[in-house]
């Protein structure tokens, strides 16, 4: 942040950038920089820095053009590590090169960041400093970080194309003791906040050359790519029996796979000429975070090349409020795709300031590594359904940010079961108790029978609802899931029978546990007035309605807006009034997931409503 520094306005905001020359110096010297303007048309030579801004209240002074300039502490630490001893270094650094107090300049320059990172000679991805290496502040030379060295060494070991039991860190079933500290250092690496920033997407996937920097150590991007490809290949196929061991003892490696998988696959796809829509990128990087919530959208624009239907590309505008930005972007998703995939997703957060028809923009209740898996697999599951079978009807974004759609009110919830929390899913006693409560609520006292129940029966609805009528195929390549068959009942039956007998010795098969751990977390079983069983979000309640909206792959649980003065509060447009609903979330109800409800309805049954 420039306190006393006076920026010189650029003559051409769209096409020019500022570059920082970091003057050479020793470890203890003050950091001195110079700023100059360059035209992108002249193909200037520079490196681009990627880093986490961090706590805005922790600031350190540097010198820019001989003037006092304050930067966030993490940037200060990066500059001190990256400064050369004998030669200058030219870099693009957003906090210095963009006048953060000028919204017009900021909007234009942020819109150029895709070009800035695509054209840099190298992107330096500063993961952070190692606090242990700075325990002696009066050092005259840069301290070395043992943590960083061990973490990068671990990545190189895990990136070898070998079976897990052939790697030196897994020479025995429980792992070789001498690598225990290396795994701890890898854990430190995986928990650095850099991996959670939405800005790192374009900063990692667009540059032709990428280098990681962690404290005193650097690591080529290719090391991480080899780790992801080879380690993932083996644990997903020939070495899959090691999965539980990895979950129990070496989770950092698995967590890192979850974090970087989308980044690496996106970088590889772009190199092959693939193009991504903004909706696709939002779905892939749903777990990434930003200080300014508008950046959850703006930070991805540099990667978007497929704007669908020749639509004018979106440009950042920091003069617009967050709610307006998000609502207009999500409405454009709907308009461009011609369906309601943009509405799919969890609604775990509260008080987001956004309408309920927009799913969560960021992670809330789950461990981040776990939510990557849940969100990715949920999207794969939804692709197996087509509840509406009809194209999107008329849709409109109202002036008060309501989404006006056509909808079929199919059923009403009359009872719900207990909620399953993220902690409950791994607790045999709590999970089994909840499942027994659900069985009793559904009137299944003698459940499960020894043979697959009839398709339309309550018993069939129940067991299929528990797994969303899907089975995990344990395949390293798509498709990962398939629709369940009657024979799949025999896979689930031994566990359900053990739940009824309170026999803790019977565990879920891995392919069923994979489904349970996704679809049951923060979910409840519900019963409807017409006698159907379904699964919905944990905050479902009696009186909520099951709707099928043309253009949607899944049904939705909607909550009518409470009556006001004996009349339901409605939207008004040219004298017309429309019922208003909040979106509780999407749902599963066996028997309507393939368009059965829509096909049996009459045209007059589909009515206009507003989602608020």
Image: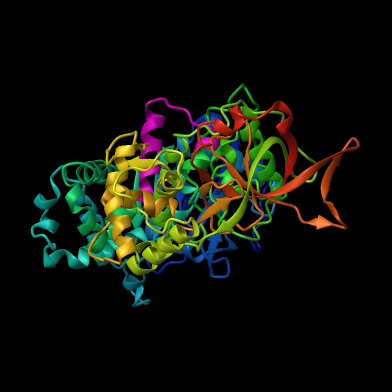
Is 269 a magenta residue? yes
- Residue furthest top as drawn: 310
**Which is the main secondary structure of the residues drawn in magenta?**
helix
Q: Quadrant of the N terminus?
A: bottom right
Q: Answer above or below: position of 166 versus 486.
A: below
State the residue at coordinates (26%, 41%).
229
Residues 295 and 455: in front is 455
Q: Is residue 573 left or right of residue 332?
A: right
Towards the viewer: 132 or 497:
497
Front-most of residues 270 and 251:
251
Q: Is residue 98 magenta?
A: no
For the record, the magenta segment spans: 258-280
Task: Return the x and y of residue 172 as percentages of the image width and height.
Answer: 8, 60
Residue 77 position in % (x across, y down) = 43, 64
Residue 23 appearing in the image: no
Say which quarter of the image contains residue 223. Answer: top left
- Residue at the far front in the pictured view: 446
Residue 402 is drawn in which quadrant?
A: top right
Q: Is residue 188 above or below residue 307?
A: below
Image vertical order of residue 532 relative to residue 273, above or below: below
Q: Residue at x 14, y 58 (%)?
A: 169
Q: Position of residue 461 (x, y in %)?
A: 45, 45
Image spot of residue 36 (x, y percent): 56, 45
Res. 130 visible in picture = yes
How many callouts does the rendering have? Answer: 0
Q: In screen coordinates, is 166 left or right of 33?
A: left
Tell me how the rendering is colored. rainbow
Residue furthest toward the right? Answer: 575
Residue nearest the observer in this picture, 293 or 429: 429
């Amino acid at each position: 942040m420039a306190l006393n520094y006076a920026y010189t306005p650029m003559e051409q905001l769209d096409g020019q950038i500022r570059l920082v020359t970091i003057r050479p110096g020793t470890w203890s010297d003050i950091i001195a920089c110079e700023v100059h303007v360059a035209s992108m048309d002249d193909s200037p030579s520079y490196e681009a820095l990627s880093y986490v801004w961090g706590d805005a209240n922790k600031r350190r002074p540097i010198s820019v053009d001989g003037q006092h300039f304050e930067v966030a502490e993490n940037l200060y630490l990066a500059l001190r590590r990256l400064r050369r001893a004998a030669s200058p270094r030219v870099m693009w650094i957003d906090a210095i090169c963009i006048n953060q107090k000028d919204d017009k300049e900021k909007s234009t320059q942020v819109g150029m960041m895709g070009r800035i990172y695509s054209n840099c000679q190298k992107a330096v991805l500063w993961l952070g400093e190692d606090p242990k290496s700075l325990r002696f502040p009066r050092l005259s030379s840069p301290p070395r970080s043992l943590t960083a060295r061990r973490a990068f060494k671990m990545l190189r070991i895990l990136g070898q194309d070998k079976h897990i039991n052939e790697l030196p860190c897994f020479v025995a079933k429980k792992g070789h003791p001498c690598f225990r500290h290396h795994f701890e250092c890898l854990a430190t690496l995986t928990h650095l906040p850099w991996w959670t920033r939405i800005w790192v997407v374009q900063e990692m996937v667009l540059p032709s050359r990428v280098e990681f920097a962690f404290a005193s150590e650097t690591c080529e991007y290719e090391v991480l790519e080899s780790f992801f490809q080879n380690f993932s290949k083996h644990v997903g196929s020939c070495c899959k029996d090691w999965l539980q061991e990895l979950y129990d003892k070496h989770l950092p490696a698995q967590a890192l796979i979850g974090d970087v998988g989308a980044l690496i696959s996106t970088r590889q796809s772009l190199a092959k000429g693939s193009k991504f829509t903004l909706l696709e990128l939002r779905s892939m990087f749903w777990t990434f975070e930003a200080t300014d919530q508008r950046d959850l959208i703006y930070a991805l624009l540099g990667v978007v090349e497929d704007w669908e239907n020749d639509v004018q590309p979106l440009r950042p505008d920091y003069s617009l409020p967050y709610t307006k930005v998000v609502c207009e972007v999500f409405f454009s998703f709907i308009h461009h795709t011609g369906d309601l995939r943009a509405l799919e997703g969890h609604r775990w957060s509260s008080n987001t300031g956004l309408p309920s028809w927009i799913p969560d923009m960021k992670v809330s209740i789950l461990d981040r590594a776990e939510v990557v898996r849940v969100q990715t697999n949920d999207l794969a599951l939804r692709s197996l359904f087509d509840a509406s079978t009809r194209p999107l009807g008329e849709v409109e974004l109202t002036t008060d940010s309501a989404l006006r759609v056509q909808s079929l009110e199919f059923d009403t919830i009359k009872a719900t079961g207990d909620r399953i929390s993220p902690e409950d899913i791994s607790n045999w006693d709590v999970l089994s108790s909840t499942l027994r409560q659900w069985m009793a609520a559904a009137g299944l006292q003698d459940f499960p029978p020894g043979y697959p129940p009839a398709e339309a029966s309550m018993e069939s609805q129940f067991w299929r609802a528990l797994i969303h009528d899907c089975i995990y195929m344990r395949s390293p390549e798509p498709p990962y899931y398939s629709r369940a068959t009657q024979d799949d009942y025999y896979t689930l039956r031994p566990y359900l029978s053990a739940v009824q007998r309170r026999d803790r010795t019977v565990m879920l098969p891995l392919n069923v546990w994979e489904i349970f751990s996704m679809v049951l977390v923060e979910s409840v079983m519900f019963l409807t007035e017409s006698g159907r069983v379904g699964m919905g979000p944990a905050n479902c309640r009696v009186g909520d309605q099951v709707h099928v909206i043309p253009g949607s792959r899944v049904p939705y649980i909607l909550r009518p807006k409470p009556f006001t003065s004996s009349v339901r509060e409605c939207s008004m447009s040219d004298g017309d009034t429309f019922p208003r609903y909040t979106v509780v979330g999407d749902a599963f109800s066996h028997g309507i997931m393939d368009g059965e409800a829509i096909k049996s309805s009459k045209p007059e049954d589909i009515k206009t409503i507003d989602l608020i």
